[in-house]
Amino acid sequence: MSVLFYRRAADAPPSEVVGLPPGLVLRSWRPAVDGPPRRRAGLWRNLAWFAFQRAGLFASGDFEALSIWRGERMLHRMVVTPRWLRFPFMAEGDLQLGGLWTDPEVRRLGLASLSIAEAHRRHAAPGRRFWYVVEEANLASVALAKTCGYHLIGTGRRTRPLGLAALGQFRLESAAIPATPRAGGDLSESVDSQIS
């Protein structure tokens, strides 16, 4: 499976955060702050994220699950993930936006771009970059990344040790643009240095 790696620059202009359509509510869960997950959709998945946070697998306490609801029905979800074993290409303070899902009945209403803009707002920090990793064949998700200000950095693949994707990593294998140093001229965290 070919994977595309998109990145939003740390100095990118802020995303415009627009209000939710009437009747919808944004919910947030941060295991480092909120503790164990509430009993809602995705409980088992969230218990795994909680365990990862508690075990110290994330580079920071910035993991967050954002979801949009109408009453008790989840319409959209996304996770904000710090650097960890699955994303070895990221720098220490970077975040990856992923795990996006939108109910088919409400697609094309802008819920995904709204949640991405909200993640940018909540997690903005000097020098912080946001990543978006997507399968090359997922054209709607590629278009979303571009619409939200992300630029193609390179291509790679998802590994599957023992045939299990859950144990795998996303490996950035070829750069689409020349490497640029981070603030201070340090090339050690540039794209080229992340290619294995």
Image (spheres, grey):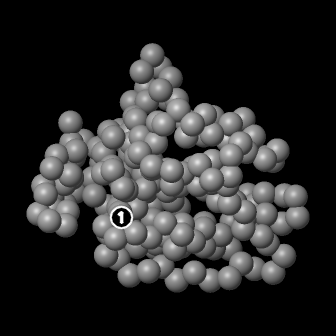
Q: Quadrant of residue 109?
A: bottom right
User: Would residue 105 be seen by someone viewing this image from the given angle?
Assistant: no
Q: Does 85 sit above or below residue 113?
A: above
Badge 1 element: loop
Q: Residue at x 68, y 36 (%)?
A: 47
State the quadrant of the N terminus: top left
**In x, y percent, where is residue 119?**
54, 66
State the quadrant of the C terminus: top left
**In x, y percent, where is residue 113?**
57, 71
Name the residue that disc number 1 marks. 128
Q: Residue at x 43, y 26 (%)?
A: 160
Q: Does 110 sit above or below residue 177?
A: below
Q: Is residue 108 left or right of residue 182?
A: right
Q: Residue at x 15, y 50 (%)?
A: 188
Q: Residue at x 83, y 66 (%)?
A: 70
Q: Does 106 sit above or below residue 59?
A: below
**In x, y percent, where is residue 185?**
11, 63
